[in-house]
Image: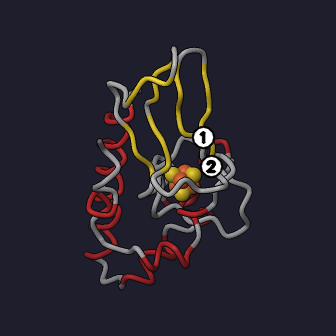
Amino acid sequence: MSYQSWFNKHADKHTTIVEKLISCGKKSDEIIDYFDYENMVKEEPDFCPLYKENKKCHAIEELNCYLCACPNFRFKDEGIKRVEEKMQYSFCSINSKHGMQGVYSDKIHQDCSKCEVPHLKSYITEHFDLNWKKIMQKCTL
Ligand code: SF4
């Protein structure tokens, strides 16, 4: 699946859930809490493929899924730039020390597997908006 395809599908799923919670009268902090991994696994099993395997993308005790993927992620399916013989497709705009550029054959993709930034509630609260695409508006290059 391309980055853009995943991005659009995920935005739709996120919007559906947020609209449901708003219609139930939930406030912003309650909406963020709803996206806690433990709750999402039970209530929204189709939101993430890892839920069905009861797996987390990151080994964080209090993992929150509201800002999956990450507002700092940048991608372009056609490729961003050539780095020697390889094509770079994504990177981290803040160059987080916990992320890295992964090389996969002739492709370079951002590897966020060791970065917890977007899953922490403090970060989500700071960057919160009901509109996921608005928070992620800089991701697509
Ligand atoms: S390395 Fe961290 S901050 Fe950077 S894009 Fe990945 S998850 Fe976001």
Relative to 55, say whether 60 is above or below. Answer: below
Q: Is label 2 within 8 A of ligand 1 (CB to nearest ligand atom)?
A: yes
Evaluate if marks 2 and 1 touch, with contact meaning CB atoms under 8 Å apart: yes
Left-right relation of 38 to 124: right
Q: Residue at x 66, y 42 (%)?
A: 53
Relative to 73, say whether 77 is above or below. Answer: above
Q: Which residue is mark 1?
A: 111
Residue 34: horizontal and vertical position, in percent?
Answer: 49, 72
Label 2: which secondary element: loop
User: The residue under label 2 is which amino acid type?
Assistant: Gly
Label 1: which secondary element: strand
**Residue 127's quadrant in the figure?**
bottom left
User: The residue under label 1 is which amino acid type?
Assistant: Asp
Residue 78: horizontal and vertical position, in percent?
Answer: 32, 24
According to the image, what is the colour scheme of the structure?
Answer: secondary structure
Q: Nearer the viewer, residue 84 or 39?
A: 84
Q: Is label 1 within 8 A of ligand 1 (CB to nearest ligand atom)?
A: yes
Q: Which residue is mark 2?
A: 99
N-terminal of the pair, mark 2 or mark 1, is 2
Residue 37: horizontal and vertical position, in percent?
Answer: 60, 62
